[in-house]
Image (tube, rainbow, N blue to C red):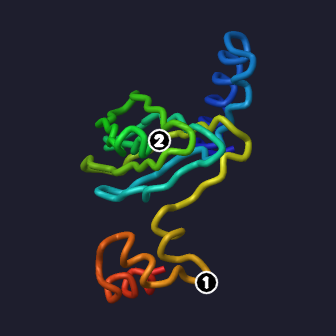
Amino acid sequence: MGNSARIQSSLQQMISSFLGSKLPKAQQIQLVQPSHRLRTKWPKPSHTHPCGSEILVVLEGTLYVGFITSNADNNRLISKLLNKGDVFVFPIGLIHFQLNVGYGNAVAFAGLSSQNPGVITIANAVFGSKPPIDLDVLAKAFQVDNKLVDYLQKQF
C-alpha cells in the first residue's frame, strides 16, 4: 500500500470513528476523492456537487478557496486563504473552486457528505454540452457577442 493510500485509509478510519461516536448520521461522509493535487498557480475549476457538501483539509501548500451563495443572497463570494492544517466546508449544491496560490504543489483531502454527491463542472456544462446550447441564448445570458461564445464552445 502506497503512502497516499495509507494516509487515506487512516484519515477515513479517524473520520468514521470520531463521527460515528459523536454524530451517527455523519457516517455517510465518504472520501470520494481522496486527494486534490494542484500544481503551482493551478485551479480546480468551478464546480458544484448537487447532492453533497464537501469538506477540504489542506495537507500541503496554500489554497485560495471559495464558494458563491445563491441568487437569494445576491451571489456573494465567500472565500478564504487556507494553509497546511486548515479546513473549509463547501455547502451542498453551491458553486465552488480551489486555486493553488503557493510556491509549490498543494495537496488536500476532500470528504463529501454523500456516497453519490454528483459533480457538475460549470464551464464544461455551459460551453461543452452535447448538443451545444444555442449561441444566441449564451450570448444574451452572458451579455457578450456570438463570436466569443462560439470560441468558448470550441474549447470544450
Residue 103, percent from left and from top: 24, 49
Q: CA distance from mark 2 to mark 1?
A: 35 Å
Q: SS class of the residue under badge 2?
A: strand
Give the residue displayed 73% in from the left and 25% down from the top. Answer: 27
The residue wearing badge 1 is: 131
Residue 141, percent from left and from top: 39, 70
Labels 2 & 1 near each other (Cβ < 8 A): no
Q: Is residue 103 left or right of residue 29?
A: left
Q: Quadrant of residue 19?
A: top right
Q: Hey, what amino acid is under mark 1?
A: Pro
> Nearer the viewer's eye, disc 2 or disc 1?
1
Q: Hey, what amino acid is under mark 2?
A: Ala
Q: Quadrant of residue 39?
A: bottom left
Residue 102, percent from left and from top: 26, 47
Name which of mark 2 and mark 1 comes first in the sequence. Answer: 2
Give the residue displayed 30% in from the left and 83% down from the top. Answer: 145
Give the residue displayed 40% in from the left and 43% down from the top. Answer: 67
